[in-house]
Amino acid sequence: MTSFVVLLLAYILSQFFRSFLAVVSGDLVRDLGLDQGQLGSLQAAWLIAFALSQFPVGYALDRIGPRRTLAGFLLAAVAGTVLFGLSQNYVAALTALALIGVGCAPILMAGFYLAARLYSPRHFATMSSLLIGFGAIGDPLSGAPLAYFLAAYGWRATVFGLAGIVALTALLVVLLLKAPPPLSGSTHRPASLLGGVWQMVTKRALWLILPFTFVSYGVTISMRGLWIAPYLQTVHGFDLAATSYAAMAMGGSIAIGALLVLPLYRRIGAKATVVACALAVVAAFFALALWGADSSRLSVALLLVIGLFGVTYAVVMAHARAFMSPQEIGRGVTFMNFVFMGGAGVMQWVSGRLVNALDRQGHEPQATFAWLFVFMGMALAAALALYVASPAESKAGTPAAA
């Protein structure tokens, strides 16, 4: 239980950093002179650095265990947070966000690693969803509470305070996180870094799961972490306070959805759960494109639907986990996380370029965001069409043939 609490604290920080730019974006535009495309690139830098770090994270988890892996990487997050508070230009802020992304990379994976080593694939989804659901508290904390500290102390002082919290978390990891028991009777040595990646890439059971993995998380986190504030402020005239409350509500819906998906998963299985939730998100994006500009209340309600049904992360991970052996767990879950976060980074970058291009063509904000929502909905629908053809997980919760 102590290890779970430490991992939960660390994951709350990771979720916070994943979404906080939506609220601090106004300060960055004013003080650093950033445009919408550069804001998108900042968020993309966090996600892409996070994603690329999954490869050494998976190797380190299998070789040296979660405690040393997590403590070492968190030092990069401390350095990145300090650098972000000192940033005077776009390049410094971009470097800082990349460092924070690297530092946060092993947090959830350490939890997944422990859960996968200690529980069956079916119970793995339960434990993972609990960590994601309660850890998602970090998302609403990056809404109204963050806005309060920004108004009271300024964004730089607030960021320096966050650096201290990250450093304290690293110390708690060193002191309190427990290592899992060794694999009984196993003399297996982990594959090399590239060899472990190749094992996952060539696992045919994952091929139709991976496109959905690449897109699904990205469309949701792009809305919560980047576009919710510009959309509500430019299309519906929300001020900072109203925007922060809407962002906090969407973050809360993500946390609730991560927990509510569990009974559905237990009842109908991973694949059917993912399909049902994804259809709801696709419908919400197209509804936003068609009618979002007409009503701020409808827009917020649809954003909550995207948050509630848009993070089937743990269920997709459990689906993929069913095709992995115990010796592949570290590399397997981090490879899947690479695809999740790499896709999210690409979605952030592409969406930023799309919004900039539409702005340069003279489109009104309503039209710009309508096209953005169409793009999100179509990308998710295409990935879902492939996912529907993927192999179902084993009914018994044991790894199926890959």
Image: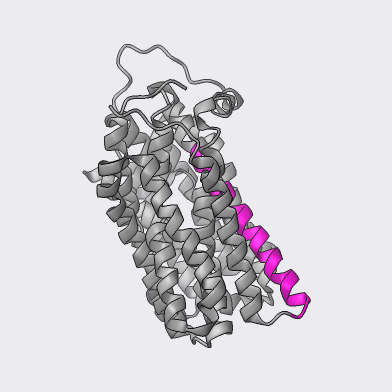
Of residues 67 and 263, the one drawn nearer to the viewer in this rendering: 263
Left of 165 or right of it: where is 367? right
At 51% from the left and 77% from the top, the residue drawn is 292
- View extreme (right): residue: 361
Give the extent of the magenta segment. Answer: 336-362
At 46% from the left and 60% from the top, the residue drawn is 281
Residue 392 on the magenta span:
no
In the depicted structure, whether residue 82 falls above or below residue 318 = below
Quadrant housing the N terminus: top left
Residue 114 x, y percent position in the rendering: 33, 35
Residue 358 on the magenta span:
yes
Q: Is residue 367 visible?
A: yes
Picture quadrant of residue 125: top left
In the depicted structure, whether residue 70 falls above or below residue 141 = above
Q: Is residue 146 visible?
A: no
In the depicted structure, whether residue 68 falls above or below residue 146 = above
Question: Taken as a whole, is the magenta stretch helix, strand or loop?
Answer: helix
Picture quadrant of residue 308: bottom left
Residue 137 x, y percent position in the rendering: 33, 62
Residue 72 x, y percent position in the rendering: 47, 42
Left of 122 or right of it: where is 77? right
At 48% from the left and 63% from the top, the residue drawn is 283
In the depicted structure, whether residue 144 falls above or below residue 387 = below
Of residues 101 and 198, the one drawn nearer to the viewer in this rendering: 198
Residue 37 x, y percent position in the rendering: 69, 68
At 28% from the left and 25% from the top, the residue drawn is 181
